[in-house]
Image (tube, rainbow, N blue to C red):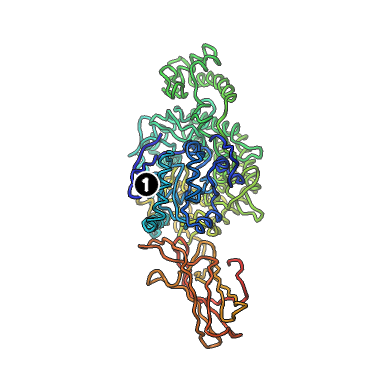
């Protein structure tokens, strides 16, 4: 389940971190509750009774870190994460560890599913610093949110050592920390940007074939899947293989696709009793899963199995698709029709407890004939395969198994269905894994698309009706009063501005409903969201930003260049734009093509990195869209510093020679401090005039805050609200005019043209522009 790896030995000698992939739940503390008690996230609420003085991600925590000059202890996880649960029980519920954290750090807890932007940023940092990724994510940050240490799960002893060693370095070797943070930040700017200039044309058709060849190089021909364990389903790989087989008739693609679909359907990763897939398998045979179930995995796999049945007419694929849909209806659908997020892996601290069986339990529930059938089909003839119990799976192919029993496959499944009903009824009487009942917009969009498509190809009108009900609820609950899309809802209350994958996945779901129902409301909603996605997140350099520019406290703007368990947001966006161009208006093709050209260097360099985008590219060409399409031109004036910076001045009532100039900057922007940290940076200066005459003044420029901007050392900058005291040589004349010369730069590295700004003499500062 995990490995020991050396981690940051130069900073924390001897410290070893455990790298894992996922997990979570725990016992309540009788000591009252912390700030997380007022949050809506199920994950944060699980930590509300910790003795740790947790803050949610936000300004209050960061102000305290700056005012008290403390480093930030950042812990990122999610509500169904097993190892998050373990760390909570072992460490965050421990009063001694909590006391250390409360004394030396400002502790911040983040639900990665509520704030995927924050998670993406610090996962990039974790991978850069450790070469690994996983949850719970443990990082140390400067008060400016710049990371200087990263790990995953830490046992209590190592966590104590980390806190004490970090505090010593914070007090005695701050320069080492700042230099390391600056190096990490420089790497993060490179890692989160587009790697090269956009190509002049779309990637060629050979790139798809190269991607398939790359997948073949890591393919397991015996059990299916790609790469070493832990083995994830990776639905984007499967969608590309299916698409390539349809286009080219490539036998190798079909073999990789069907071997993987068959292996997963037979394995323990698939819930043979209740339906739905667990998150990943720990072994190549897909036998022993990590038992949590995620909506986004099952949405994608429902889509893949339904498309595979449509492509191959294999009845087993239909059975799997229908079992996923049945599980979603039974366990993952709220009263409003929206879909819940996840089921936990454990019950009462024991992973898989609700899913595994002993022979004695089966004998008690089944007739002798049923017991004999179940043991032969589901691998109970040998020793237990999970502690003292069994994970149900198919050791042999269903056709082989049926032949050995002198049955047809249909007869075998008919007999098994009666057994499944008995086992599921008994299993539902057991204590159940925790349910994360929040609705994530992107995951709901993916399930709406999957149900609509499955309903069409499987001729299941009930699936289409469920997709419509969810879409209607989403468009009502997950929009704010101005109609803007939101990211997450719980108990009917939406919050947090939508991200790119939220827009794209919902558009794809609405377009699938448009195809299956031909109802104008879905088409209109899809077009409106397409325009909003472009207006809100489009990057003129090509492709889309993940989060709105107005989102505070992001040290970089994350942009993924690899599909994973979820498609990269820009991959989803291209497919959504292709659908909009094909079904609604060809104008959307321009942004799809521009995104494909922006990512062409990634696809050319490593074709298998973004299989979902290659699937979108195949759909673009299949739709016959213009390969030279470009976004429609708009009147465009390059922004300069005046667009993001303003300044106001107030004259001192007791001394007319003294004034205070207050800077007002948009979120995420700064100007250089004075004196400038480097020769080529433009310092911020206040100037005074009366008519044509320059006035002498002395300005007391503050030091500013340090910012790691990728240079050898941090630079000093001014943020919104910084005040600059100014003293004139003589009392201020009536015709006094102040100006501010400055250059605005964003915290992720974009600098605007310098400008000379008129300072408003109207009084004290107001809200930033």
Q: Total number of numbered labels?
A: 1
Q: Can residue 420 be seen in this view?
A: yes
What residue is shown at x 50% (from left), y 21% (from top)? 357
510 sits left or right of 404 in the view:
right
617 sits left or right of 506 in the view:
left
In this rendering, the answer to whether 298 lies above or below 684 is: above
Secondary structure state at the residue bearing disc 1: helix
Quadrant in which the C terminus is drawn: bottom right
Quadrant in which the N terminus is drawn: top left
Q: Where is residue 743 in the image (x, y as percent from the top left)?
A: 47, 71
Q: Where is residue 393 in the image (x, y as percent from the top left)?
A: 45, 24
What residue is shown at x 54% (from left), y 14% (from top)? 364
Q: Position of residue 589 (x, y in %)?
A: 50, 55
Q: Position of residue 516 (x, y in %)?
A: 59, 41
In this rendering, the answer to whether 597 lies above or below 442 is: below
Q: Nearer the viewer, residue 729 or 633?
A: 729
Q: Which of 23 and 628 is in front in this view?
A: 23
What residue is shown at x 44% (from left), y 62% (from top)? 707
619 sits left or right of 648 in the view:
left
Which residue is denoted by mark 1 in the rendering? 130
Q: Can residue 213 be seen in this view?
A: no
């Amino acid at each position: 389940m995990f490995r020991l790896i050396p981690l940051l030995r130069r900073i924390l000698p001897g410290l070893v971190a455990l790298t894992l992939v996922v997990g979570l739940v725990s016992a309540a503390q009788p000591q009252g509750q912390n700030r997380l008690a007022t949050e809506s996230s199920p994950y944060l609420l699980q930590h509300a009774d910790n003795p740790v003085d947790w803050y949610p991600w936000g300004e209050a925590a960061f102000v305290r870190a700056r005012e008290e000059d403390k480093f930030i202890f950042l812990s990122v996880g999610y509500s169904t994460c097993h190892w998050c649960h373990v760390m909570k029980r072992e460490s965050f519920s421990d009063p001694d560890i909590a006391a250390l954290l409360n004394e030396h750090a400002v502790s911040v807890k983040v639900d990665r599913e509520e704030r995927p932007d924050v998670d993406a940023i610090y996962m990039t940092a974790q991978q850069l610093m450790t070469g690994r990724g996983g949850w719970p994510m443990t990082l140390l940050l400067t008060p400016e949110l710049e990371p200087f240490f990263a790990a995953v799960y830490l046992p209590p002893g190592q966590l104590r050592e980390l806190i004490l060693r970090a505090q010593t370095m914070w007090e005695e070797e701050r320069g080492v920390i700042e230099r390391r943070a600056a190096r990490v930040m420089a790497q993060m700017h490179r890692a989160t940007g587009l790697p090269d200039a956009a190509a002049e044309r779309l990637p060629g058709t050979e790139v798809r074939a190269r991607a398939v060849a790359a997948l073949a190089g890591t393919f397991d021909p015996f059990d299916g899947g790609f790469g070493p364990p832990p083995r994830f389903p990776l639905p984007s790989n499967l969608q590309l293989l299916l698409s390539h087989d349809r286009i080219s008739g490539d036998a190798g693609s079909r073999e990789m696709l069907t071997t993987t679909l068959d292996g997963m359907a037979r394995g323990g990763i698939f819930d043979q009793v209740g339906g739905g897939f667990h998150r990943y398998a720990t072994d190549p045979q897909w036998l022993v899963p990590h038992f949590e179930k995620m909506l986004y995995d099952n949405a994608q796999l429902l889509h893949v199995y339904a498309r595979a049945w449509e492509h191959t007419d294999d009845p087993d694929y239909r059975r799997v698709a229908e079992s996923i849909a049945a599980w979603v209806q039974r366990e993952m659908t709220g009263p409003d029709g929206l879909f819940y997020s996840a089921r936990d892996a454990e019950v009462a601290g024991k992973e898989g407890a609700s899913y595994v069986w002993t022979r004695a339990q089966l004998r008690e529930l089944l007739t002798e004939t049923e017991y004999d059938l179940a043991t032969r089909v589901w691998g109970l003839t040998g020793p237990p395969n999970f502690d003292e119990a069994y994970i149900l799976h198919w050791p042999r192919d269903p056709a082989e198994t049926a032949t050995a029993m002198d049955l047809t496959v249909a007869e075998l499944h008919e007999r098994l269905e009666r057994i499944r009903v008995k086992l599921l009824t008994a299993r539902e009487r057991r204590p159940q894994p925790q349910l994360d009942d929040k609705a994530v917009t992107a995951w709901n969009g993916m399930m709406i698309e999957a149900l609509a498509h499955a309903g069409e190809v499987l001729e299941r009108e009930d699936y289409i009706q469920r997709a419509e009900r969810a879409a209607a609820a989403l468009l009502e609950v997950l929009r704010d009063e101005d109609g803007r899309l939101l990211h997450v809802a719980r108990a009917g209350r939406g919050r947090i501005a939508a991200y790119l994958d939220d827009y794209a996945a919902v558009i794809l779901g609405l377009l699938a409903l448009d195809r299956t129902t031909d109802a104008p409301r879905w088409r209109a909603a899809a077009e409106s969201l397409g325009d909003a996605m472009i207006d809100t997140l489009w990057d003129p350099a090509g492709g889309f930003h993940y989060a709105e520019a107005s989102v505070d406290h992001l040290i970089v703007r994350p942009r993924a260049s690899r599909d994973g368990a979820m498609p990269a947001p820009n991959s989803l966006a291209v497919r959504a734009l292709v659908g909009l161009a094909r079904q609604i208006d060809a104008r959307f093709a321009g942004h799809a093509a521009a995104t494909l050209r922006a990512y062409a260097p990634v696809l050319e360099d490593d074709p298998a990195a973004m299989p979902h985008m290659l699937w979108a590219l195949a759909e673009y060409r299949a739709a016959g869209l213009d390969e030279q399409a470009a976004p429609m031109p708009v009147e465009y004036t390059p922004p300069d510093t005046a667009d993001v910076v303003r300044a106001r001045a107030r004259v001192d009532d007791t001394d007319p020679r003294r004034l205070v100039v207050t800077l007002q900057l948009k979120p995420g922007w700064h100007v250089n401090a004075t004196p400038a940290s480097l020769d080529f940076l433009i310092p911020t200066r206040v100037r005074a005039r009366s008519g044509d005459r320059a006035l002498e003044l002395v300005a007391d420029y503050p030091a500013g805050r340090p910012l790691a901007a990728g240079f050898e050392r941090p630079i000093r900058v001014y943020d919104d609200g910084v005040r600059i005291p100014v003293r004139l040589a003589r009392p201020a004349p009536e015709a006094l005019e102040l100006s501010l010369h400055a250059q605005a730069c964003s915290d992720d590295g974009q600098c605007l043209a310098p400008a000379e700004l008129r300072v408003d003499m109207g009084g004290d500062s107001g809200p930033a522009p």
